[in-house]
Image (cartoon, rainbow, N blue to C red):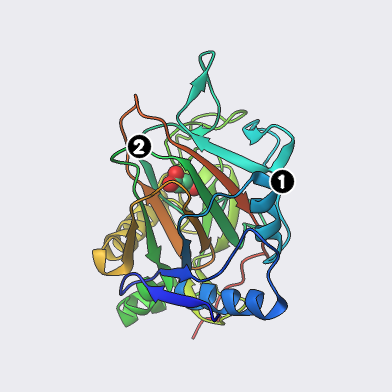
């Protein structure tokens, strides 16, 4: 039976049907899923119930699994590659990251030198409402920029702040940032050439404490405001309403995502793996 890919929105996203992902895939199936992932940016597998070993085995077919950073301390016990994203507390302590609040637009771990190519998020427990996740097509965002703005940002680099997560929490070992030009983190090209598709994408990371290298803070803020205002448009976005058993696999090199808040009394538990990426490469200035 051939794999079916069903487009989910004009912007990005496809549902994958007729594929058993609990078993090893053939080389042809891996290639077909990879092609669809590069074309659709986010793949949705519904109604799967994967153990952590199966989640890792499925993920590994598309790259090398990254270990959850040591400072997180929120990996599944005995599974150093599986991060828990959850608001649940046990004995008063969170079992995972991000809580129940909104997670602002971001791309995963853009503040490290080799940000992950892919993230895979598997839903184990889901609230009745809230907690939807949205993805943005950063190729389309870049393509739709006015030509003059494309020229202005060609060759620029952005510092991706490492101090604060997408729920607004200061990460362990960091101080609150007061001057974005001094924020810790890593500099990446603002326009990123996707290493596989060779298409340019706007690589914004996160808004908070971002800084365009070489500009004054005021100039950097003004430029970033302009870019974010352009990007925050529904035509670039796909919204996902979670069901238990969903697995979503997305490309961090050409998407951003955000999450709605949800009822703090509800339980939401997701398990995430990530694949080690390459150093982002910029697009040669025209
Ligand atoms: C994330 O931002 O990586 C998690 C998204 C979610 O909780 O839906």
Q: Which mark is residue 176?
A: none
Residue 172 lies in what quarter of the image? top right
- Horizontal and vertical percent for residue 272? 57, 47
Q: Residue furthest top?
A: 91
State the image coordinates of residue 185 (x, y, percent, origin top left).
59, 47
Is 208 in front, or is 266? 266
- The quadrant holding residue 63 is bottom right
Residue 208 image position (x, y, % from top left): 41, 45
Q: Is residue 55 visible?
A: yes
Q: Is residue 80 left or right of residue 210?
A: right
Which element type, helix, strand or loop, lies under badge 2?
A: loop
> Residue at position x 33%, y 72% from top?
11
Of all residues, the one furthest to the bottom in this rendering is: 286
Q: Are marks 2 and 1 in contact (CB under 8 Å)?
A: no
Q: Is residue 36 above or below residue 100?
A: below
Q: Would you say 56 lies left or right of 39 here?
A: right
Q: Nearer the viewer, mark 2 or mark 1?
A: 2
Residue lying at 44% horizontally and 46% vertically, measured from the top left: 244
**How far is mark 2 from mark 1, CA to CA?**
28 Å
- The residue positioned 58% from the left and 31% from the top of the image is 174
Q: Residue at x 31, y 56 (%)?
A: 225
Q: Which residue position holds label 1?
A: 67
For marks 2 and 1 on the same chain, the one whose residue lies earlier in the sequence: 1
Q: Is residue 213 visible?
A: no
For disc 2, the marked residue is: 127
Q: Residues within 10 Å of mark 1 (few under 14, many from 20)?
A: some
Badge 1 marks a residue whose secondary structure is loop
Query: Quick one: label 2, few (<14), some, or many (20+) residues within 10 Å?
Result: some
């Amino acid at each position: 039976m051939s794999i079916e890919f069903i487009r989910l929105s004009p912007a990005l996203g496809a549902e994958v049907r007729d594929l058993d992902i609990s078993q090893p895939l053939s080389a042809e199936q891996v290639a077909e899923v990879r092609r669809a992932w590069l074309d659709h940016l986010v793949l949705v597998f519904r109604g799967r119930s994967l153990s952590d070993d199966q989640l890792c085995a499925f993920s590994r077919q598309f790259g090398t699994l990254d270990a959850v950073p040591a400072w997180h301390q929120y990996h599944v016990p005995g599974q150093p590659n599986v991060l828990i994203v959850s608001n649940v507390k046990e004995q008063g302590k969170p079992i995972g990251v991000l809580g129940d609040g909104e997670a602002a637009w971001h791309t995963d771990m853009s503040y490290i030198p080799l940000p992950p190519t892919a993230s895979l998020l598997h839903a184990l427990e889901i609230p009745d409402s809230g907690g939807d996740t949205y993805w943005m097509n950063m190729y389309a965002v870049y393509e739709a920029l006015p030509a003059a703005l494309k020229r202005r940002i060609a060759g620029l680099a952005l510092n991706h702040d490492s101090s604060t997560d997408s729920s607004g929490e200061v990460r362990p070992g960091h101080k609150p940032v007061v001057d974005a030009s001094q924020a810790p983190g890593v500099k990446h090209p603002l326009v990123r050439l996707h290493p596989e598709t060779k298409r340019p994408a706007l690589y914004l990371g996160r808004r908070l404490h971002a800084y365009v290298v070489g500009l004054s803070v005021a100039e950097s803020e003004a430029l970033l405001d302009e870019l974010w205002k352009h990007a925050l448009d529904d035509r670039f976005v796909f919204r996902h309403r979670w069901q238990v058993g969903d697995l979503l696999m997305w490309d961090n090199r050409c998407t951003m995502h955000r999450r709605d808040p949800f009822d703090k009394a509800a339980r939401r538990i997701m398990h995430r793996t990530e694949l080690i990426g390459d150093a982002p490469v910029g697009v040669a200035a025209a």
